[in-house]
Image (tube, rainbow, N blue to C red):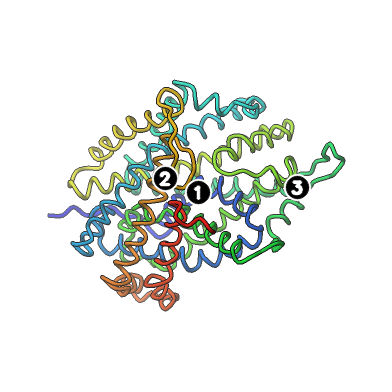
Amino acid sequence: MEKKRNTFSGSLGFVLAAAGSAVGLGNIWRFPYLAAKDGGGLFLVIYLILALTFGYTLLVTEVSIGRKTKQSPLTAYKKLNKKWGFLGIIASLVPVIIFPYYITIGGWVVKYFLAFLTGKGTEAAQDGYFTGFITSDIEPVILMLIFLAVTAFIVFRGVNKGIESFSKIIMPLLILLVIGIAIFSITIKKTGDDGIVRTGVEGLKLYLIPNLDGLTVKSFFTVLLDAMGQLFFSLSVAMGIMIAYGSYVKDDAALNKSVGQIEIFDTVVAFLAGVMIIPAVYVFSGTEGMAQGPSLMFVSLPKVFAQMGKVGNVIGCLFFAMVLFAAFTSAVSVMEAIVASIMDEFHTSRAKAGIIELIIAIIVGTIVCLGYNKLYFEVKLPNGSIAQILDIMDYISNNIMMPIVAIGTCILIGWISKPQTVIEEVQKNGEKFSRKGMYVVMVKFITPILLFILFLKSIGLLTFI
């Protein structure tokens, strides 16, 4: 007799858990940078249009596959079509590769949160602080293990008592922190050494008002691909997560409505991340102060907080608390995708599957941490960037495997199983599929083409845009 699958208690639990997965570090350390680089409001408009079309198509497809098959990514594709089981293997390997380096970065966030919590924010803003930390032997490993322990504890507790309960507490807190810091960021001002007064409101205008100066067809396509890439990587699609979470959604839940709410949640948090960061960086560093990735979060922003005086330590502590919440919700979802695949494929318990993944994460996570000191080396990637162990794993998962999974999913649903597979799942219990016509066109034609272009760009074969 087949064991009954655990489910979210209702739509709210699913929406908060899925939104928590989507609201990760990419929304915080990459979205504001791209918005500032790509003409402010122009990037925002394009991103919003893509979220309602491209992003929605990918989200509703994966969640529907999960609920229809009641399987994790490793076995879901095989259940849809036996010949497409290979896609499930690739999809289930993505989180296995991502998780060790994500918990490593999670350890970095713990370091900065503790620094600001203990009043050492000024020290954290010093040149060389971040490099000195990640190149040390022991501390990054210990903090990675602490972050992993909390993540594993939540996953081990299961869908209801762990993931859902955690999301219902953390996500409202995260939103409150994001809104609070965003409001503060708008209100600040500073007179520079040159006598020019910069205000948060001016920084907000820089963020919101489209800058069309020098806009060409080439630069427009650059903005389009940047927005598409950010959306693709921030929605937690092509990682098996949304299929796993979809498998926990009850049959009577309103799928279309829930996916729309996740879409809104992710977009609003990404937008507010820009409101938090761009005005603050503008006031203290000008337009040249924006960076992306670790250099924004662990170098540029601590310097901004240090220039705020005593209040900067408080704001820095709240900011890194918010980042820590976002990191945990994403890490939990990545680990859950792995654990669910092990449980479904080998018909084992959550505890055994969790222990297997925990051992793998400890070993590989330690290797990633040591990749900045004892195991340090550099290689040049096909896209031209210089990479270490963490960067190599990120490149393989994000730039190669995820686009392949997403393109394959569109081909499977659009042309093999047919869009009706998803349409029937969404329309279960009489729910209206308001974007049905758009969905069919997107999943069959537009989305796979856009993904293929993104794939070529991400591996360095499309260099003229």
Give above or below for 450 relative to 98. below
Label 3 sits on a secondary structure element that is helix
Disc 2 to disc 1, C-alpha distance: 29 Å
Q: What residue sits 70% from the left and 48% below the top?
A: 279
Q: Which residue is mark 3?
A: 187
Q: Which residue is mark 1?
A: 171
Quarter of image, res 125: top right
Q: Earlier in the sequence, mark 3 or mark 2?
A: 3
Residue type marked 1:
Met
Q: How many marks?
A: 3
Label 2 sits on a secondary structure element that is helix
Quarter of image, res 430: bottom left
Q: Position of residue 145 (x, y in %)?
A: 40, 29
Q: Earlier in the sequence, mark 2 or mark 1?
A: 1
Residue 309 as seen in the image, left or right of residue 409: right
Circle 1/circle 3 CB separation < 8 Å: no
Quarter of image, res 226: bottom right
Q: What residue sits 22% from the left and 50% below the top?
A: 344
Query: In front of the other: label 3 or label 2?
Result: 2
Q: Position of residue 212 (x, y in %)?
A: 69, 63
Disc 3 to disc 2, C-alpha distance: 38 Å
Q: Position of residue 280 (x, y in %)?
A: 70, 44
Residue type marked 2:
Tyr
Q: What residue sits 27% from the left and 35% below the top?
A: 355
Query: In front of the other: label 1 or label 3?
Result: 3
Query: In front of the other: label 2 or label 1?
Result: 2
Residue 201 as seen in the image, left or right of residue 194: left
Disc 1 to disc 3, C-alpha distance: 25 Å
Give above or below for 236 relative to 97. below
Q: Which mark is residue 395?
A: 2
Q: Earlier in the sequence, mark 1 or mark 3?
A: 1
Residue 429 as seen in the image, left or right of residue 233: left
